[in-house]
Image (cartoon, grey):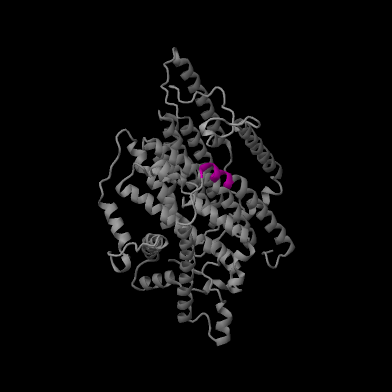
Amino acid sequence: MNLAQGVQVVSLGLLSLMVLGAALGVVLANNIVYSAFLLGGVFISISGLYILLNAGFVATAQILIYVGAVNVLILFAIMLVNKREDFAPISSAWIRKGVTGLVCIGLFALLSTMVLTTPWLIASIPASGEQATLLIGEHLFSDFLLPFELASVLLLIALIGAIILARRELIVNEPASGVDAGLMLPERPREGVAVGSDP
Amino acid sequence: MSKSRHLLSGTDKMNSGINLQGSFIDFFQGLGLPYGTVKLLWLPLPMLLLLLGATVGVLVVVWLERKISAAAQQRIGPEYAGPLGVLQPVADGLKLLVKEDIIPANSDPVLFTLGPMIVVIPVFLSYLIVPFGQNLVLTNIGTGVFLWIALSSVAPIGLLMSGYSSNNKYSLLGGLRAAAQSLSYEVPLALAVLAVVMMSNSLSTIDIIEQQSGYGIFGWNIWRQPVGFLIFWIAALAECERLPFDLPEAEEELVAGYQTEYAGMKFALFYLGSYVNLVLSALLVAVLYLGGWDFPIPIDPILQLLGIDSNVPWVQLITASLGITMTLLKAYFLVFLAILIRWTVPRVRIDQLLDLGWKFLLPIALVNLLLTAGLKLAFPVAFGG
């Protein structure tokens, strides 16, 4: 085993440990902010695994999309809400825990049988390496065009939905009154939002 | 810096440039060491050199910032620490180094310590792709500028982390603003880069510069991408949180934003990170739009005219140092512009900032991309077919 192989084996072990540890942390951490930060750790470790698989473009895209966009948005949502609330103890919580455990064990069994039964033959086509970016682009615009476009339509729907949820009603004809008229934003106060009240 | 250029195609460029790595390995193999060991010895050298270079670059920028700010306000600026005050940044650094490291009560000590690190590490990692010459780059990876965009999108997590863990409303607001800002300006930035990438058919920084070389100053991307250049520069300033976009640390509103509770070395990390990021952005503007290491007058025809072979060692040495000088000159000219802008332009409001990003820069960047694609189809000679 030469230097490069040794580095690969050690990195693989470390990255797998990081993925597993961080993923367990996401589930088990009591503070939801910790879970969100650990989720970022999971994504970064997975991107490291992609690098080990010689998939540089996928690794970079993983960081850009999952860490830079998805995880930041999750954190944003958590911090904007930032409602610290202790969980109220639920009576007969063991039923829920048992059902959750059963479902999780079932999923795990399903996945492990899938992993064990799939023939993991390595393709005889040589790895594309640096040309991977080109190949991914060609696939996205030929045989994977429909899923690609569908995904973009889905994102558009999400975008429009978010805009509609966040849109404010502007006051058109009502002149603003009072001393702070110039400082006020011409919008109607939203109902159902308790500003400044105790939680 | 190494010559670890993984060539996609076996062009004759393979031999150009000085092969420092090759000579190093040959020298130590001559002493009887096995190849693997020599390679292991070589690996950290270019990385350390670049790390050192980036840090020294920050010292220069801090001095420039102080001197130019002083000149803009008709003051003298630092004067006593060394000639013309050049040692002032070192004194600043020493002061921050020996300051007491305070972790505020009721804060989250783990996240409080992790935050600055997560902000600084991606910025230094991005130096991986900055080329200073044909072979003077740490690694010429295929995903080049895309890697930079991805890495710069990690920093908001660190900002959010330090803002949240400080247990201070100004810090939290500053962190949220920083994240919102870099999320919104990432999009026009990436679209502006995409237009350049489309013209050079490659994400690699080396290929992008090679596409601009050959015609001297007239080959540079700034003439073909003037709008893209402006978008990129504005977005880069916003990503670096430079004035007019320094809302995350707007001192009149938020004390110092996410840095409010930081002192000593942790504050120094933020400080270092922001200036390293500024130099990095300036370097990338130079790479993407100003021809990188290219001299304004094409050198190869002159050499041919004088009858000098460009593969002679001393010519190689001169062209390599000229390349490094040109890259740094261009980058520091842009840093100078950024400092001038800081003392010329007032700060925008947060709603103006987001409006500018989403309603102005984004549509313009999209139109620029579309135009570039159209021009590429219409004039493949000039716009890289």
Which quadrant of the view contains residue A3? bottom left
Q: Decide if residue B134 is on the left or right side of residue A163.
A: left
Is B28 rendered above or below residue A55? Answer: below
Region rendered in magenta: B349-357
Q: Nearer the viewer, residue B300 or B179?
A: B179
Indicate whether residue B237 is drawn in magenta.
no
Q: Nearer the viewer, residue B128 or A175?
A: A175
Please state the total of marks drawn on the protein image: 0
For the stretch drawn in magenta, what is the main secondary structure? helix
Q: In this rendering, does residue B138 appear at all?
A: no
Picture quarter with the C terminus of chain B: bottom right
Picture quarter with the N terminus of chain B: bottom left
x then y, percent, for residue B375: 71, 61
Q: Decide if residue B213 is on the left or right side of residue A145.
A: left
Q: Decide if residue A191 is on the left or right side of residue B94.
A: right
x then y, percent, for residue B185: 54, 48
> Which residue is at 46% across, 70% downward?
B324
x then y, percent, for residue A5: 44, 54
Q: Residue furthest top?
A: A91
Indicate whether residue B352 is drawn in magenta.
yes
x then y, percent, for residue B249: 42, 45
Q: In this rendering, does residue B222 appear at all?
A: yes
Which quadrant of the view contains residue B125? bottom left
Q: Residue furthest bottom?
A: B307
> Which residue is at 49% across, 69% downward?
B133
